[in-house]
Amino acid sequence: MTDEQTLAYVKAAAVVVGLPLDEAQIARVAVHLQRTAGLAATLEVIPLAPHDEPAELFCPAPFDQSR
């Protein structure tokens, strides 16, 4: 997304969820959103096999009640 598109997205999303953001806050959120999108894009190019994916369900070990 371009800078303008990111700003428009942040403004629209803030309205939808009822966040009263001023222009400075919108700009800061947009910077972080672009940074996060860049990190995600970097990770998306790494090929993963099915065994590389995280488990769908976390099953903790049984709790030792003797302690």
Image: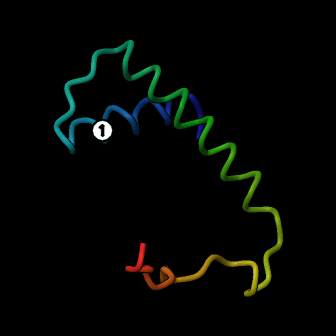
Q: Is residue 63 left or right of residue 56?
A: left
> Which residue position is annotated with label 1?
12
Q: Where does residue 63 sit, x and y in percent of width and height?
A: 42, 80
Residue shown at 27% from the left, 22% from the top: 21
Residue 57 shows in this picture: no
Residue shown at 54% from the left, 31% from the top: 32
Please tell me whether mark 1 sits on a helix, a strand or a loop: helix
Looking at the image, is 49 positioned above or below residue 34? below
Q: Is residue 52 left or right of residue 25?
A: right
Residue 49 shows in this picture: yes
Please, what is the three-letter code of the amino acid marked with disc 1? Ala
Q: Where does residue 2 sit, x and y in percent of width and height?
A: 59, 34
Depth check, front residue: 34 or 60: 60
The crowding category of the residue bearing disc 1, from other C-alpha atoms within 10 Å (few below 14, some 14 to 19, many at least 20), is few
Residue shown at 74% from the left, 57% from the top: 43
Q: Is residue 52 left or right of residue 24?
A: right
Q: What is the number of callouts on the image?
A: 1
Q: Where does residue 38 sit, x and y in percent of width and height?
A: 68, 43
Look at the image and tell me in which quarter the C terminus lies.
bottom left
Residue shown at 75% from the left, 86% from the top: 51
Looking at the image, is 52 positioned above or below residue 46? below
Q: Where does residue 12 sit, x and y in percent of width and height?
A: 30, 38
Depth check, front residue: 58 or 36: 58
Looking at the image, is 55 positioned above or below residue 25? below
